[in-house]
Amino acid sequence: MTHKEDAAFEERERYVQDLFRRVAPRYDFLNRLLSFRRDVAWRRFTARRAGLKPGDSVLDEATGTGDLAFDLAAVVGREGRVVGLDFTEEMLVRARAKADKLGLSGVCRFVQGNALDLPFEDEEFDAATIAFGLRNVVDRERCLSEMRRVVRPGGHVLVLEFSQPVRPVFRQIYLLYFRHVLPLIGRIVQGDADTYRYLPETVLAFPDQESLAANMRKLGFRHVRYHNLTGGICCLHVGEV
Ligand SMILES: C[S@@+](CC[C@H](N)C(=O)[O-])C[C@H]1O[C@@H](n2cnc3c(N)ncnc32)[C@H](O)[C@@H]1O
């Protein structure tokens, strides 16, 4: 990587971190509002597809305020271990407070770190997940390779991310909502135009279902498959290490 690329990546990371620092206090509220609460079902679906059993250990990266980590905790149970990693402390503060409230502090641990350079041993986890995070990292391949590194052979890596609806008419309606209505609501609630312009921009630039699956296969994941959720608004990719 050139020095110039390095500097551009660092600047982009600072931008993303700053954005989530600002959005943290209203993040959960806006998620539920803008997705009509579908985000709750999407994360639960993900936790159930992780191939986990009670007592297993799982990493949830770009964990944010911890919602997927809590769904994973319900699967691995009191004997299990969930580590939530994120590079924005303001999001983690909320995740830890929610864990306390839910009585899950003994199962879920939240650590600050970068998804592109995970502070974990090779094959340390039975699975790794990332929800609405892969779109935000500056190097997708590196992020996926790091997830692959820390999961034991046979374990699963799961990517939950916004995608694009597959049916043409639904797709048009969705794009209208996504490009125009969503940034407007975001601006009213959040009070700044930038944040909810970032969301449609990054979603529209993200690879479609087939391209991401091909990318995962190229990186060495086995049995890669995906599930379109709510008509393809969201998509869960699953690969085996
Ligand atoms: C849209 S939020 C998703 C939060 C959560 N997974 C969810 O389902 O609501 C994206 C999160 O990714 C985090 N993030 C982005 N790039 C990261 C990186 N390189 N390393 C760690 N966290 C990162 C941000 O701080 C933010 O909390």
Image: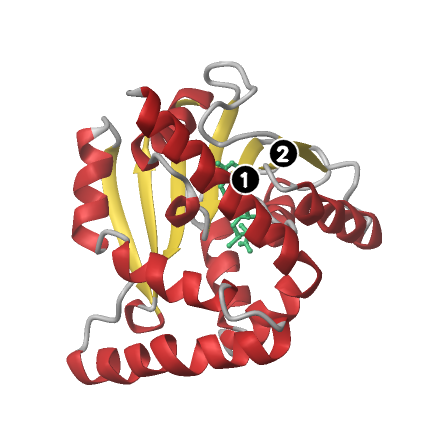
Is residue 107 placed above or below 40 in the rendered structure?
Answer: above
| Amino acid type at mark 2 | Val
Residue projecting furthest to the front: 4
Label 2 near ligand 1 (CB < 8 Å): no
Q: Earlier in the sequence, mark 1 or mark 2?
A: 1
Is residue 8 placed above or below 22 in the rendered structure?
Answer: above
Residue 82's disc number:
none
Residue under circle 1?
A: 60
Q: Is residue 25 visible?
A: yes
Residue 180 position, x and y percent, is 38, 81
Q: Is 113 in front, or is 96? A: 113
| Amino acid type at mark 1 | Asp
Q: Secondary structure at mark 1?
A: strand
Q: Secondary structure at mark 2?
A: strand
Residue under circle 2?
A: 83
Residue 162 position, x and y percent, is 36, 60
**Quadrant of the image containing the C terminus:** top left
Q: Is 240 in front, or is 178? A: 178
Circles 1 and 2 in contact, beta carbons < 8 Å:
yes
Residue at (51%, 23%) from the top-left corner? 118
